[in-house]
Image (cartoon, rainbow, N blue to C red):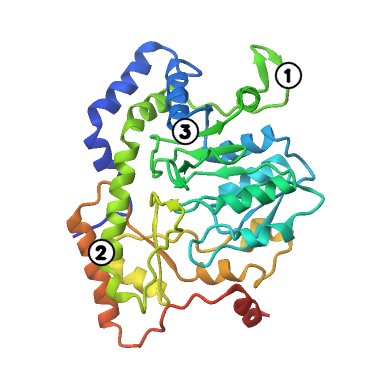
């Protein structure tokens, strides 16, 4: 049996008629940029959040950039975020001219460690970007309290957590702005690049509309410096026909996650399954496990026909592109420790129960066949890690 990490072809075939009709509707309209399809999708996406405004843009990276720009983040500023994220989060900060400042992550949920933020705030700090990673949100209540104390906007990076909730509040509605990616693999994906920004205030919304379209208030009237970052009509039409299925797809992801967790229950001494914060509803964009012999397990799974990935093997502060920031090994001990051990298993709504059982079975085979005793999974505290790496 083969288990792909993602299966876009199967997904397309399941919804082929609706998707084809949406595309043909746009082609026949003759309107391909900033038309009715985008406007309709933006309204529907805003409704998902209860109330507020949404603007479509060209990618998740530019969604974060536009949100930062709407909060006047610019050259010389600093933005606090995490190094354990897709580099596009950091790219967006760099696009503004600001400098990313990294804090470490929580040992269990892998998202921003709120306790480290205050020490990172300085006179140049202009915003905080919590990344809701793998499908669950950052612990937002203490973060928002701290941000309010220092009068800093919070911009939620929701690329991997669309429709996740924290204490019943949907992702994107707690911070100043929410930034989304519609990359094809996301919980709701386009058939190409795409993104969106959610705003609670009309003032922010109107500024975002200008920022994504060359800074125009109306055609040929450029009131502010903007960029070209527009979600095209074809992608908007596709997303519009897919949005009603988001809840169903997220439910299936949660069901798959529970099957994995139950299947790995007897491996808790060698495999750590995802941990969900009690205030969160996790929507499992990814299902990420921890094992000591990650690379060997990955090779074993691939040999049996199961594709896996690592999200992410090299944290941003250790990337060559960001060496100028001056971070050294040991600076973010939890991040550096975890990225050597994490492995993302197949996770998408089209996975069959048979495929899930096969992944569980082959994982058990690895631990049963491995003659070298494995160390018990032990996530040590940041303090201990710092001492061991100093």
Disc 2, SS: helix
Q: Are marks 2 and 3 in contact (CB under 8 Å)?
A: no
**Residue at 28% across, 62% down:** 260
Instruction: State the residue in front, 333 or 266.
Output: 266
Disc 3, SS: loop
Disc 1, SS: loop
* For residue 247, side relative to residue 2 (left or right): right
Q: Position of residue 114 (x, y in %)?
A: 62, 58
Q: Quadrant of the N terminus?
A: bottom left
The furthest residue to the bottom? 372
The residue identified by callout 3 is 49
Q: Which mark is residue 359?
A: 2
Instruction: State the residue in front, 282 or 293.
Output: 282
**Residue at 58% across, 30% down:** 200
How far, Cα to Cα, is label 2 from label 3?
35 Å
How far, Cα to Cα, is label 3 from label 1?
29 Å
Kindly report which numbered mark, 2 or 3, lies closer to the viewer in this rendering.
3
Of callouts 2 and 1, which one flags the residue occurring earlier in the amino acid sequence? 1
Q: Position of residue 327 (x, y in %)?
A: 70, 65
Q: Position of residue 112 (x, y in %)?
A: 58, 57
* For residue 313, side relative to residue 210 (left or right): left
Q: Are marks 2 and 1 in contact (CB under 8 Å)?
A: no
The residue identified by callout 1 is 223
């Amino acid at each position: 049996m083969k288990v792909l990490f993602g299966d876009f072809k199967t997904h397309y075939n399941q919804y082929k008629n609706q998707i084809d009709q949406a595309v043909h509707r746009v082609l026949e309209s003759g309107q391909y940029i900033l038309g009715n399809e985008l406007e309709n999708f933006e309204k529907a996406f805003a409704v998902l959040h209860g109330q507020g405004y949404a603007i479509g843009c060209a990618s998740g990276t530019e969604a974060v950039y536009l949100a930062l720009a709407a909060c006047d983040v610019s050259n010389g500023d600093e933005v606090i975020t995490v190094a354990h994220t897709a580099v596009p989060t950091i790219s967006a900060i760099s696009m503004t001219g600001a400098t990313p400042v990294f804090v470490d992550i929580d040992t269990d949920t892998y998202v921003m460690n709120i306790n480290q933020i205050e020490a990172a705030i300085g006179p140049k700090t202009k915003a905080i970007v919590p990344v809701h990673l793998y499908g669950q949100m950052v612990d937002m209540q203490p973060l928002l309290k701290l941000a309010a104390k220092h009068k800093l906007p919070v911009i939620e990076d929701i690329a991997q957590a669309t429709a996740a909730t924290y204490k019943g509040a949907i992702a994107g509605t707690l911070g100043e702005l929410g930034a989304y990616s519609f990359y094809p693999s996301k919980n709701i994906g386009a058939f190409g690049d795409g993104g969106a920004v959610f705003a609670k205030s009309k003032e922010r919304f109107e500024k975002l509309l200008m920022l994504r379209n060359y800074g125009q208030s109306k055609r040929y009237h450029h009131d502010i410096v903007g960029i070209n970052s527009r979600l095209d009509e074809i992608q908007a039409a596709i997303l519009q026909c897919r949005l009603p299925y988001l809840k169903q797809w997220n439910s299936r992801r949660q069901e798959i996650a529970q099957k994995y967790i139950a299947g790995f229950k007897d491996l808790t001494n060698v495999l750590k399954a995802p941990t969900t914060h009690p205030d969160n509803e996790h929507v499992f964009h990814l299902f990420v496990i921890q094992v000591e012999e990650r690379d060997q397990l990955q090779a074993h799974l691939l040999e049996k026909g199961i594709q896996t990935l690592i999200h992410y093997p090299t944290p941003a502060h250790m990337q060559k592109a960001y060496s100028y920031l001056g971070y050294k090994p040991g600076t973010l001990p939890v991040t550096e420790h975890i990225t050597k051990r994490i492995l993302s298993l197949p996770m998408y709504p089209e996975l069959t129960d048979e495929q899930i059982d096969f992944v569980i079975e082959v994982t058990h085979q690895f631990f049963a066949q491995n003659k070298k005793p494995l160390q018990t999974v032990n996530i040590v505290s940041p303090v201990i890690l710092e001492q061991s790496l100093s």
